[in-house]
DNA sequence: CGGCTTCTTGAAAAGTATCAAATATAGTGG
DNA sequence: CCACTATATTTGATACTTTTCAAGAAGCCG
C-alpha cells in the first residue's frame, strides 16, 4: 500500500492522491506543486535508506527546486490523502517577492522540524500535533479535527520509536488534549498541547 | 563571553566577528549578510530559551528573511571566528535565479541538519564533522583542518548531551578519523568518517 | 603566571528502544 | 453488507544507552 505511483493521467489540473502514494522521486523532472490539503513527507534517498528530510502542509509548495534545475531533490510521499495542483509561476514583477516569501516560510518550517527532534518524547509529540493542527488551517481554534499520519511516519519525524509515539499519544489522550476518531483522525485541543512549566534546562546560555 | 554584540562601526564592508558574538537578533532590522568564513548558529527565541534552528556555513547568506519583511527571524551567533560582508542584491534579471538557488540550498541544508539528529550519537557526530569539513571548502580532500565549535554548541545541534559528544569525538579520535589540534581546531579525514556497514534498520519501508 | 572556561572521564540513574503478543482498525472480496 | 485477512496500534517486560552528576585535567586569556 505504501509506494503507489501518482497517476498522471486525467485532467491536468487538480489531483487527488491517496495516502502512501509517491508524488515524485529524486532525479525525476516535473513541475512545482501546491499542496491544497493533506500532509506530505519529503525524504532524501541515501542509497537504500530513506532519510526524513521535511514535511509539507496545506498551502506549501512541493518541488520548488525545479525552478533552479529540472530535477527533484527528494521523494515526496503522502502521509494522508492529499489534493495537489500544479503551481503557476507568477509573472516577472511579482516573482522575486513570492520567492522571498518562500524563503522565509522554508526557514520557519525547518526550525519547526528541528523542534520536533528536541526534548522529551512527550514534548516532541505535542509539538508535532500542534504543527499538524496549525497546518490544517485551524489557527487559534479551540478544537481541531486533523488527519493523523501513521505512527511509523510520526516516529520518523520525531526520531522516536513508533511504540514511544503511541505511548505519548495515549498519555495526551488521558490528559484530554487529544482524542482519536478512528485510526487516522484525531481531535486535538491546541490549547492543552502546551508543555507543562519547563522547570529546567534552557538549551543555551 | 558568549553574547557580545556585533560592532557595527568601522568600514561598512567586511566585518570580522569573534567567536560567541551575536550578529543579529529576532525583530531587529538590518541587511542580509554573506558568511565568508566561519560557522554561525541560528536560534529561535522561545521566550527565555533558545532553540537551535539552523546552521550557516561559509558561502551561506544570513538573514535573507529581510528580503520579504525588514525583520530578522532568528538570532545569529558565531560558533567560530567569522568574516561576513553585506550581501548585494543582484539586479532585476538575475534575482529570481539567485533566489531559486537559495531555495534549493536551504532545502538541502535543512535535510543535512535533520540528519544530524538521526541515529546513534556516534553517527550524528560523524555527520556533523563531515558537514563542517565540507562547509570549510574542502570537498574531496583527504584531510581537512577545521575550526571546531564548542562542545555545548555541537550538543545543541545534534540534540545530545555535551558529554556524549565528547565521548563520540574521543572514539573517532582513537579510530584515526579526527585529531584535535588544540581545543578549537581539528584535523578530520572525511574518508574515515563514513559509517560502518549499516547492518540494520532502514528508516522507512 | 593565575583565573576561568571548557573539556574529559567515571559511576549511577533514568529513559527509550526493542521484542513480543494481543487488540483494533481498515481493506477486500464474496 | 458481512466476514475475512492484512495492516496498524497498543501494551507490557526487559536490555541497553544516554543523560546526569561530579570531579579532575587541560586549554585559553589577560
Image (spheres, coloured by chain):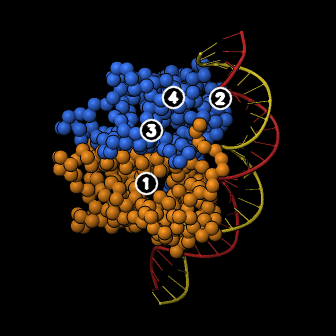
Chain colours: A orange, B blue, C red, D yellow
Instruction: Identify which residue is drawn at 52% across, 67% down.
Output: A189
Q: Is A99 left, or right, of B84 in this rendering?
A: left
Say which element carries label 1.
strand
Q: Which residue is mark 3?
A: B25
Q: Which residue is mark 4?
A: B4
C-alpha separation, residue under disc 1 versus residue under disc 4: 35 Å
Q: Which residue is mark 2?
A: B170
Residue A53 seen by the camera: no
> How many numbered marks have been drawn onto this rendered protein structure?
4
Q: Picture coordinates of residue B195 (x, y %)?
A: 56, 37
Q: Nearer the viewer, mark 2 or mark 3?
A: 3
C-alpha separation, residue under disc 4 versus residue under disc 2: 31 Å
Residue A189 seen by the camera: yes
Return the residue found at the far front.
Answer: B9
C-alpha separation, residue under disc 2 versus residue under disc 3: 34 Å
Q: Looking at the picture, does residue B138 appear above or below residue A172?
A: above
How many residues crowd mark 3 within 10 Å: few (<14), some (14–19), many (20+)? many
C-alpha separation, residue under disc 1 versus residue under disc 2: 35 Å
C-alpha separation, residue under disc 3 versus residue under disc 4: 12 Å
C-alpha separation, residue under disc 1 versus residue under disc 3: 27 Å
Q: Picture coordinates of residue A89 (x, y %)?
A: 22, 52
Q: Is A20 left, or right, of A179 in this rendering?
A: left
Q: Which residue is mark 1?
A: A55
Q: Looking at the picture, does residue A8 appear above or below residue B87?
A: below
Q: In the image shown, does A161 or A95 lie closer to the viewer?
A: A95
Amino acid at each position: 500500500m505504501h509506494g503507489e505511483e501518482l497517476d498522471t493521467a486525467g485532467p491536468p489540473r487538480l489531483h487527488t492522491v491517496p495516502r502512501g502514494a509517491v508524488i515524485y522521486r529524486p532525479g525525476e523532472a516535473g513541475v512545482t506543486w501546491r499542496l491544497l490539503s493533506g500532509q506530505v513527507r519529503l525524504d532524501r534517498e541515501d542509497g537504500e535508506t530513506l532519510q526524513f528530510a521535511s514535511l509539507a502542509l496545506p498551502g506549501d509548495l512541493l518541488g520548488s527546486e525545479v525552478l533552479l534545475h529540472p530535477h527533484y531533490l527528494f521523494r515526496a510521499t503522502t502521509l494522508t490523502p492529499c489534493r495537489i495542483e500544479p503551481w503557476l509561476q507568477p509573472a516577472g514583477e511579482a516573482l522575486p517577492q513570492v520567492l522571498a516569501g518562500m524563503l522565509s516560510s522554508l526557514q520557519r518550517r525547518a526550525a519547526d522540524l528541528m523542534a520536533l527532534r528536541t526534548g522529551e518524547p512527550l514534548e516532541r509529540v505535542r509539538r508535532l500535533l500542534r504543527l499538524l493542527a496549525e497546518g490544517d488551517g485551524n489557527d487559534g481554534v479551540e478544537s481541531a479535527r486533523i488527519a493523523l499520519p501513521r505512527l511509523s511516519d510520526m516516529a520518523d519525524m520525531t526520531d522516536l520509536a513508533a511504540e514511544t509515539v503511541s505511548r505519548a499519544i495515549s498519555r495526551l489522550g488521558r490528559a484530554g488534549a487529544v482524542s482519536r476518531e478512528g485510526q487516522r483522525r484525531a481531535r486535538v485541543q491546541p490549547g492543552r498541547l502546551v508543555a507543562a512549566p519547563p522547570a529546567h534546562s534552557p538549551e543555551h546560555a
